[in-house]
Amino acid sequence: MEEKSSQLPEIFLKPYDAQAHEKKCYEMWESSGLFNPDVSVEKGITQKDAETFSMVLPPPNVTGHLHMGSALMLAIEDMMVRHARMQGKRTLWIPGTDSAAIATQARVEKDIQKEEKKTRHDLGREELLKRIDAFVEKNKSHMIGQMRAMGASLDWSRYAYTMDDARYDAVMEAFIQMHAAGLIYRGNRIVNWDPKGQTTISDDEIVYEERKATLYTFKYSKDFPIPVSTTRLETKVGDVAVAVHPDDARYKEFVGKEYDVMFCDVPLHITIVADTEVDPEFGTGALGVTPAHSHVDWEIADRHGITNRPAVINEYAKMTVAGHLEGMKVNEAREAVAEWLRAEDLLEKEEEITQNVSTAERTGGIVEPLPKLQWWIDVDKTFTLPHSEIPGIESGSETTLKEIMRSAVKSGTIQFVSERHERVYMNWIDNLRPWCISRQIWFGHRIPVWHKDEEMKVQVESPGESWEQDPDVLDTWFSSGLWTFSTLGWPNETDDLKTYHPTTLIESGYDILFFWIARMVLMSGFFLGQVPFKTVYLHGLVRDGQGRKISKSLGNNIDPIDMIEKYGTDAVRLSLVTNMVPGSDSRISEDKIRGYKHFANKIWNISRFVLENRTVDTAKETQWDDADKRDLAELDATITDVNGHMESHRIDLAVDAVYHYVWHTFADEVIERSKDALKGDDVSARIRTSRKLQHILTTSLKLLHPFMPFVTEAVWQELPKDMKDAELLMVAKWPRT
RNA sequence: GAGCGAUUAGCUCAGCUGGUAGAGCGCUACAUUGACAUUGUAGAGGUCACAGGUUCAAGUCCUGUAUCGCUCACCA
């Protein structure tokens, strides 16, 4: 037996300096090409027929900067990806950014307004789009830099942007195919119109705000038999009916009768109808039906065959009826109608109530329900799905988009890590209405439809002279819905698509469960007959140390990039995922981050100790004594724990297990107890002990790597060759027991 | 109005299929030139929201109550 001590690299004489290593490490990883699974297969690191692990990055809005929410997302996903990669899986993580049509256009318009005092109409469609492209290009590289800083091992060779050429082709193809299947149609329906943003928005983009309002109770005319209650008096000039509950004894005798009245200079023809939608307890138990300006009323009109649906409010939230209300804003008109009612002695009651007002999420404008000609996706219409891999839906059978969304989850093909979100998802589908996909803005995927007089053609290229393209663009979630397969080359039948779709897992904030997750299920089901992913992992909001939402007004924002500079990326990553339960909100504070910086340094010093006391020997086998065996058994138990937790997607518990093992078992016990043996005269004990420490160190570095990639890789690079099974820790063999 | 979640140490939270209460931060005392300027040891601190029930045994399972929070719908 021979003993030889080895030299300690000088770098360990100082505390771990994250700044000095992170950039270098990332460059080393990236230039290895091993973020790309194809390169990994070429180099013989990953087996060609290995199990795949694929995931798309939820593309951040191109307007954005990295905040704690996106940092959490990148941390969780990178941990999963690095774990899978070390397990030898053929691992692909696709990066991208989202054009976020409305948000981006609004942002650029705002800048132009501020700097040049011009509106988009001053610039024109083409010029505005140029400006947006320039903005996007500038912001894109900034955002990519931040993703790198988080250590995200994304395959940059597959980078996608929702507005790039390949994705544009996919979106166009998708629209055309869905239209051909009869699921996309153009129709006049009530939309949520945002007068401030001058566009429609989807149901999910509405935020309800509680406000005080006056509930007016009045009669249309002196001899009208039923008083009605409303908070929106100004819309009453668009009424066509009064609805009462069919069982309401007070009004039974009037059902079916029709009345003509002159209401505020406007002639109205009112039919009394019976509808179960009406709550007899509310107000007078009678509802004035204004089909053009209320979702519910539109549906009541549908049910009773009322075709007269006069619009009385325009896109600027101004009155369009002839008479003295004409041109007034809705709130002025409301007061004017009240005045008129008082003068005519028709107003019976005014009371204060609180009600929820619909506002637009992006602009804060009060949403005005208006009937408009829009493009819709019909989620209830049956169509034939030629190919289906979704249990419960046969290839070639008739189904609906709703059914696809339901079956994918009900059959267990898609599983939610947090089960309660599965119920939320199902509940949402049950209440789903047609999806309005057209937006009246300029930035986005323009609808591939051409109009000429009464004719219409659905195609990408102009059919010729005098054909005008539909001015609207698609809802940004239409293109996002295609993301799992548009990033893999669809509509082309690429190898990527065959190899990596359905993706293994989707990780995203629960706030876009409906916007995005559900729409991906819809799109992927329709176009591929597949689920887009097998597992849904939802993370919650990142709150501050006191559990408050992070907001500008509270000034409690913690900027991840600042924290990275101060404490290192590993510390930031760890502090984000510890004490985090999938699907629930989590908290972060600077103290917490600092704590994990200490841990990074601890790892550094453990490594220093092991290397300082390292002995090299030639023996192949080691005769462990009982104490060694106990130590190694504890290591194995930790490996089992970590693997179990990763299996059940509990990153927080996996991190907890390895953290406690490394600090409180390896450092505090194994190393402390080893000191006597290392200083002692027994050569074989020295060798055996050092061997044990080296083994535990390399195994610990591997277990830690997915969570703290930088410090572990930095140490790994300093280890002598005989301690390692791979040049890069990133692709070293994951420990198994 | 409907659905869902939470309530465990001063603070933030773990605790999986029931078996003597855990971590981090904070606090107290002591030790320490140490592999560690970022250390160690020890300690204080909990009727596990409340009330019932199942069980040999209940933070853990069941029922109810209270408080807080989230999501959806929306009353005109």
Image: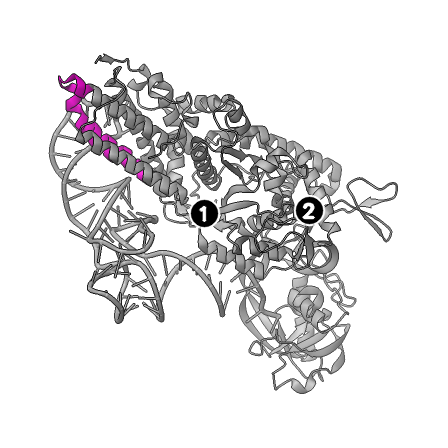
Badge 2 marks a residue whose secondary structure is: strand
Q: Is residue A589 visible?
A: no
Q: Which residue has dot 2 on it?
A: A474
Could you confirm whether marks 1 and 2 are on the same chain?
A: yes
- The residue carrying pointer 1 sits among few (fewer than 14), some (14 to 19) or many (20 or more) residues within 10 Å by Cα, namely many
Q: Is residue A208 above or below residue A68?
A: below
State the image quarter where residue A255 is shown.
bottom right
Q: Chain of mark 2?
A: A
Q: Is residue A296 visible?
A: yes
Which residue is found at the position 35% from the left and 43% from the top?
A653
Marked residue nearer the N-terminal end (1 or 2): 2
Residue A368: percent from left, percent from top: 66, 59
Instruction: Report the front residue among A205 and B41.
Output: B41
Which residue is found at the position 22% from the left and 12% from the top?
A2
Write down the region rendered in magenta.
A657-686
Q: Amino acid at mark 2?
A: Leu
Q: Is residue A321 above or below residue A385?
A: below
Residue A151: percent from left, percent from top: 46, 30
Q: Amino acid at mark 1?
A: Leu
- Magenta region's main secondary structure? helix
By what rule are the colours in the image chosen? one colour
Q: Chain of mark 1?
A: A
Q: Considering the image in quadrants, where does the C terminus of chain A appear?
A: top left
Say whether marks 1 and 2 touch (CB < 8 Å).
no
Residue A637: percent from left, percent from top: 28, 38
Instruction: Report the front residue among A46 and B29.
Output: A46
**In-image side of A149 versus A589 (left or right):** right
- The residue carrying pointer 2 sits among few (fewer than 14), some (14 to 19) or many (20 or more) residues within 10 Å by Cα, namely many
Query: Is residue A195 shown in magenta?
Result: no
Q: Is residue A241 above or below residue B71?
A: below
Q: Which residue has dot 1 on it?
A: A541
